[in-house]
Amino acid sequence: MPLLSPETLTLVLTCFVSYLCVTLPSLLLGTLISSLLLIWIDRERWIGRLPQNRLLGCLLGAGLGILFPLGGVGAAPVARRLLRQGAPLPVVAAFWVAAPTLNWAAVALTLTFLAGQPKLIFLRIALTWVAALLAGLWFSLYDQSPETLLRGAPVNAEADDPDPLHRSGNLRYDSDFKPLTGLPLGEKLRLSVQALGDEFLELAGIVIVTSALAALIAVFFPLAQALTWAVTPTQQVLLMLALGALFPLNGIFNVSFLVPYLETLWSGALLGFLLLGAWVNLQTLGLGVALLRGRAWLYGAILLAQFSLLAALALNHHWG
């Protein structure tokens, strides 16, 4: 197929739109939850009730990931809001890892598409819990304020500033001088829409760029030749980990990609794709670079990639 033929361009556009259809609804829901946490929830009250114990915080964060069908992209704005409002780091880290896979929509699709693979279903859910706990415990060793992980430090608000919301880039945050809980209903609705729109537009730009890059890779990547090369169990694991990282199918929908390969690939390769693809892909890496400062996002991505690789190899070589 010629490089710039109409058929090629149509295929790239189709992949690009497909990736956006998968991720933008999740991002919209995530930014909606973020704005609700900012405007409608008294942060002093609910943050004070979160457990300070590391293990309990990890368990709670992973449990919160069950509630909403966010995926890795939708979990990003919620995690940033939790950090900005002072939630313990183990809670946020465990939530961000658990949300793409443990939410009810992802579990339902996993049960549907992998109905004949009960071992794979169990391992995907169980190992996600384990990874969420490990990530939470790892980041609990971070000895600075969770807010210092975020890019864009908030500007100090003045007591006489009339605006109840302030900016850190496009992220809205509340002023300590003007609590939002006492505002009239109409003002709360206005501020909610304002915060939602600003944050969604900011993060949607990152999603669009990474989706375009992923669409190009999906069209020009020689998948058929790669599958022919990947003969041994280890080669298949490495290939599927790479595909999981390149294709932003979201933790909710990546299971559908595997249906044609359930009978031809080793179980470890399938598991590695399901695990890593939900956590580390072009979109989540792009959001991680944009939202987190320093090497925090890199350490987290490496930890999850190592965990996925070890789990996949262990399944191949010890359980078949």
Image (cartoon, rainbow, N blue to C red):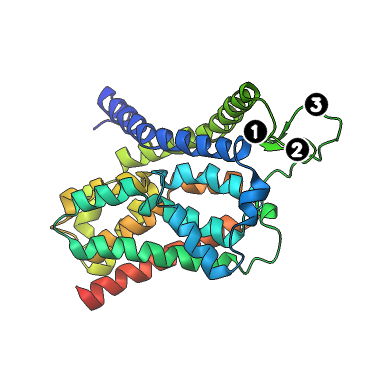
Query: Mark 2, residues whose alpha carbon is within 10 Å: few (<14), some, or many (≥20)?
Result: many
- Mark 3 and mark 2 residues within 8 Å of each other at the beta carbon: no
Q: Residues within 10 Å of mark 1 (few under 14, many from 20)?
A: some
Instruction: Name the mark nearer the viewer: 2 or 1.
Output: 2
Mark earlier in primary sequence (2, 1): 1
Residue to which mark 2 is pinned: 175
Identify the residue under disc 1: 170
Q: Is residue 152 left or right of residue 221?
A: right
Question: Image point 81% across, 40% down: which residue?
Answer: 156
Query: The C terminus lies in which quarter of the figure?
Result: bottom left
Specify whether 163 is left or right of 271.
right
Q: Looking at the image, is mark 1 or mark 3 earlier in the sequence?
A: 3
Q: What residue is shown at x 58% (from left), y 64% (from top)?
A: 139
Labels 2 & 1 near each other (Cβ < 8 A) = no
* Residue type highlighted by circle 3: Pro
Q: Residue 248: x percent and y percent?
A: 38, 44
Indicate the secondary structure of the residue bearing disc 3: loop
Residue at the disc numbered 3: 162
Q: In this rendering, is residue 228 above or below 220?
A: below
**Residue, x 60% and y 41% (percent of image)?**
41
Secondary structure of residue under mark 1: loop
Residue 9 vs residue 107, the one in the foreground? 107
Label 2, label 1: how far apart the Cα atoms are? 15 Å
Amino acid on which disc 2 is placed: Ser
